[in-house]
Image (spheres, rainbow, N blue to C red):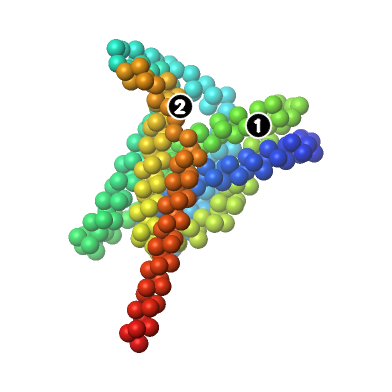
């Protein structure tokens, strides 16, 4: 069953795929962190771990149903007018709805945090998620949206590896399990860091808005959407992750400067 692991090419593919799953899971960790931080403190770690564990099970089940996911790419309805042309598919609808959900969730969270001083304590408490199951449900739903893209990417990377039909599936399952375990290790420290730094919270929400737009653009691209004979292209993920990394670097430098300034002011006051 695991003869495929004796091949050097399989190990290279496994390491690459695991790294890719971790990178593609960054946006998932950000969403999980923001959602879990709205729970009471004693339930936040549990929500993060359960959310990632259920995400792992969900991705493994989707790997076994890969033929169903591939079938979702086929358009089932076409629109062809003088200015708009597109083929609507199941995968496109899932990505489009997921993008809209991220835009709504992120903008509402930003609005809540920006207007926080104007809210009373009771009103702020009412906006928190009181149910662990409700938080986990939100996490599982958004992970399903993120899983579509990462799993189809994994299928493309492992295509042709091994002599048996199940070899590629074994590699993908191992990569998913290893990447989720690594994300579980770092997810809670990331959640605490985001919760302790309001500016990073806003930056993380801004990332989710970018990802929401990316999902909508990808849905349009997969549907071969043309507006006035101009086809909508997919946004390269490398650009998106570079923008996120650059923004985080700038924010960390700002945090370091603020910390030095606070220490200097404290020394002067003493």
Characterize the local packing of mark 1: few (<14), some (14-19) or many (20 or more) Cα atoms within 10 angstroms.
Answer: some
* Quadrant, the C terminus: bottom left
List x then y, in percent, for residue 213: 37, 37
Residue 128 sits above or below residue 142 on the image: below
Q: Position of residue 42 (x, y in %)?
A: 44, 63
Instruction: Quote the CA–CA distance across marks 1 and 2.
Output: 21 Å
Whether residue 132 is visible here, answered yes or no, is: no
Would you say 237 lies left or right of 120 here? Answer: right
Q: Which residue is mark 2?
A: 91
Q: Earlier in the sequence, mark 1 or mark 2?
A: 2
Count of residue discs: 2
SS class, disc 1:
helix
- Residue at 59%, 52% in the rendered image: 182
What is the x, y in percent for residue 9? 74, 36
Quadrant for the N terminus, please: top right
Depth check, front residue: 184 or 254: 254
Q: Is residue 129 visible?
A: yes
At 62% from the left and 43% from the top, the residue drawn is 18
Q: Quadrant of residue 224?
A: top left
Which x, y percent locates residue 7?
78, 37
Q: Which residue is mark 1?
A: 158
> In the image, what residue occupies the spot 65% across and 28% down?
159
Q: Quadrant of residue 114?
A: bottom left
Front label number (1 vs 2): 1
Residue reaching furthest to the bottom: 270
Q: Is residue 182 above or below residue 151?
A: below
């Amino acid at each position: 069953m695991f003869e495929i692991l004796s091949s050097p090419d399989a190990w290279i593919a496994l390491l690459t795929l695991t790294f890719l799953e971790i990178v593609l899971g960054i946006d998932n960790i950000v969403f999980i962190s923001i959602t879990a931080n709205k729970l009471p403190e004693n339930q936040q770690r549990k929500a993060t771990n359960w959310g990632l564990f259920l995400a792992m099970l969900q991705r493994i089940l989707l790997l076994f149903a890969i033929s169903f996911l591939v079938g979702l790419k086929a358009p089932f309805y076409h629109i062809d007018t003088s200015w708009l042309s597109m083929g609507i598919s199941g995968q496109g609808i899932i990505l489009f709805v997921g993008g809209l959900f991220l835009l709504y969730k992120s903008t509402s969270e930003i609005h809540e945090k920006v207007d926080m001083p104007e809210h009373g304590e009771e009103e702020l408490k009412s906006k928190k998620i009181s149910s662990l199951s409700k938080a986990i449900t939100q996490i599982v739903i958004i992970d399903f949206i993120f899983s579509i893209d990462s799993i189809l990417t994994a299928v493309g990377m492992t295509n042709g590896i091994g002599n048996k039909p199940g070899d590629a599936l074994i590699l993908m399952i191992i990569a998913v399990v290893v990447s989720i375990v690594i994300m579980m290790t770092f997810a809670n420290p990331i959640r605490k860091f985001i919760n302790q730094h309001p500016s990073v919270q806003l930056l993380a929400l801004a990332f989710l808005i970018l990802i929401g737009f990316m999902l909508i653009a990808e849905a349009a691209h997969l549907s071969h959407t043309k507006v006035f004979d101009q086809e909508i292209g997919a946004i390269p993920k490398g650009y998106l992750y570079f923008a996120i990394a650059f923004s985080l670097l700038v924010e960390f430098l700002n945090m370091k400067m603020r910390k030095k300034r606070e220490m200097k002011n404290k020394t002067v006051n003493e």
